[in-house]
Amino acid sequence: MTTVGFIGLGAMGAPMAWNIEDAGFDLVVYNRTTDREQPFAEAGVSVADSPKHLTERADVVCCIVSDGDAVAEVLERDLGVLEGLDEDTVFVQMSTIGYAETMAAADLVAETGAAFVDAPVSGTVGPAEDGTLVGLPGGDESVVEAVRPILEAMCEPVVHCGEVGQGTNMKLFINLLLGDAMAAFAEALVFGRANGLDVEAMGTVVENGALDCPLFDIKGGTIGEGDFAPRFPVDYQFKDLSLALDRAGEVGAPLSQTAAAREAFSAARARGYGGEDMAAVIKPMEETAGVEAREE
């Protein structure tokens, strides 16, 4: 039986790890804060005391942590992943990080003889719980196919994006579009409310035209209810737009809309909404216009 090591048991990582367990793989987990490990230990899942010891026990190591610095720390720390890798191990990097950070991690893993798959995911906590994230692996085709059953325990579909680094580029593409669309939708709702339009009526018009999409349906509903519990926080969306702009500068792609969207999320962070759902990008706009996009 394939043994899967899973590093990072946060809001996304924990349900992803449970789905691996439910799919019948032998699972061992590690988290930098041990309280996140407790539910797994209570369920009889093996818990490692360091990334090295997890890696030494695993055939495939999946890692989803907060940012590029956290990935580097997990790899390079004392008793880190690099100390436990060998040529029989595959390291699957699932965090949303920058392109340069992805390639640096791939180089470190390659030096150990292990294989590297760049496999961020698209989706939030709900799809993570349901096993319906969109998997975006980049890497050698044979290696991606070898780990596909593991990815499919967490993701539906799994889209091979190309070589290492292309998974990261695809994740930045989709989160760039997500952030741009969310900021534009928030602006439109505030414009409508400033003109006296009814929130529910605006939603009906959107839902019955060419702009109908799950994002507007879901976020329109939560904004209307005043529900800003974090499914995907403002802070994370700001980070991802910043990563996309960094990469755009490297390849010479103009991202004027994305630059404006990042500033909208920056304003939300500056007013203390960074930990709220990305839909809270609307709050500074509402405050400036003196309206709220809430249902009656």
Image (spheres, helix red, strand yellow):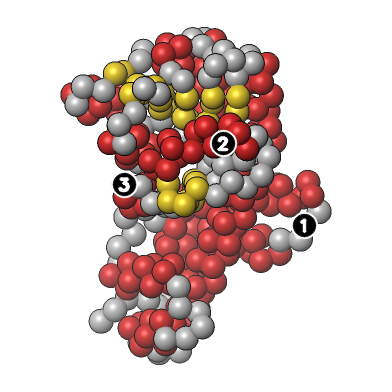
Image quadrant containing the N terminus: top left
Q: Nearer the viewer, mark 1 or mark 2?
A: 2
Q: Residue furthest right?
A: 252
| Image location (x, y in percent) of residue 279 | 42, 62
For disc 1, the neighbor class at 10 Å (few under 14, some 14 to 19, many from 20) is: few
For disc 3, the neighbor class at 10 Å (few under 14, some 14 to 19, many from 20) is: some
Image disc number at residue 253: 1
Tags 2 and 3 touching, CB below 8 Å: no
Q: CA distance from mark 1 to mark 3?
A: 35 Å
Q: Is residue 68 visible?
A: no
Q: CA distance from mark 1 to mark 2?
A: 28 Å
Write the residue at 42% across / 47% down.
155
Q: CA distance from mark 2 to mark 3?
A: 23 Å
Between 266 and 100, the one nearer to me in the picture: 100
Q: Nearer the N terminus, badge 2 or badge 3?
A: 3
- Give the amino acid at mark 2: Val
- Give the amino acid at mark 3: Glu
Q: Nearer the N terminus, badge 1 or badge 3?
A: 3
Quadrant for residue 150, please give it. Answer: top left
Does residue 218 appear left or right of residue 182 in this picture? left
Secondary element type, mark 1? loop
| Image location (x, y in percent) of residue 102 | 64, 34
Q: Is residue 268 visible?
A: yes
Image disc number at residue 171: none
Between 77 and 133, the one nearer to me in the picture: 133
| Image location (x, y in percent) of residue 206 | 44, 82
Write the residue at 29% across / 18% down.
46
Q: Which residue is mark 3?
A: 129
- Give the amino acid at mark 1: Ala
Q: Which residue is mark 2?
A: 144
Q: Nearer the N terminus, badge 1 or badge 2?
A: 2
